[in-house]
Image (cartoon, rainbow, N blue to C red):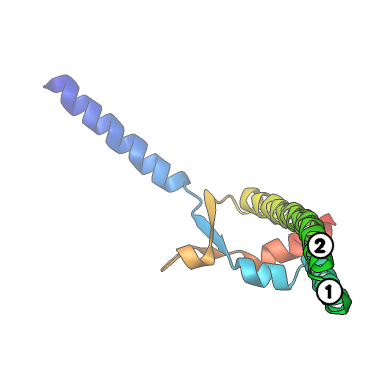
Amino acid sequence: MKNFKLGVAALAILAMTGIANAGGVGYIDYARVIDNYDYAKQVTKEVDAKGLEMQQYLVDKEKEYKSLDTPLKKQTFEERVSQEFKAKESSYLALRDKREKEVYNKIQEAAKAVMVEQKLDAIMDARGIFVGGVDITQSVISKLKTLK
């Protein structure tokens, strides 16, 4: 019983020192970071341009399709265009995913640097915080501008 009380007392002391050393939780408004991050804007434009290019491709192919005169030509054309479009779509999705990961990783890198600077324990998205925490959104935006 004496060891049990000693163990409980030791845990209580450790818990109190852990609380005293805790830096807290920071949060960022990810959408605001994206809106204020030039590289993210550039990536969005690039991905949107690729999407518009695919739409234009479909419009052009629809015009070609209407000019075909036989059902066999139309069927062959549909099959060819379908394969070409799948390849373009796959390329578009790969580009989008790659660019989104690049942006996310850069924001995460900046957030980690701010976390260390401000001695925080963790950083969460603002949507996950109901009460409390430290808003570090502007600090992350500033860090992104210096990282380039």
Residues packed near mark 2 inside 10 Å, few (<14), some (14 to 19) or many (20 plus):
some
Marks 1 and 2: in contact by CB < 8 Å?
yes
Q: What residue would you read off at disc 1?
A: 65
Q: Is residue 37 left or right of residue 61?
A: left
Q: Earlier in the sequence, mark 2 or mark 1?
A: 1
Q: Quadrant of residue 83?
A: bottom right
The amino acid beneath tag 1 is Tyr
Indicate whether 32 appears above or below 98: below
Tell us which disc is closer to us: 2 or 1. Answer: 1
Instruction: Quadrant for the N terminus, please.
Output: top left
Query: What is the x, y in percent for residue 26?
Result: 54, 59
Query: What is the x, y in percent for residue 129?
Result: 45, 65
Indicate whether 28 appears above or below 3: below
Q: Is residue 114 left or right of residue 71?
A: left
Q: What residue would you read off at disc 2?
A: 81
Q: Which mark is residue 21?
A: none
Query: Which residue is at the front of the view, 131 or 37?
Result: 37
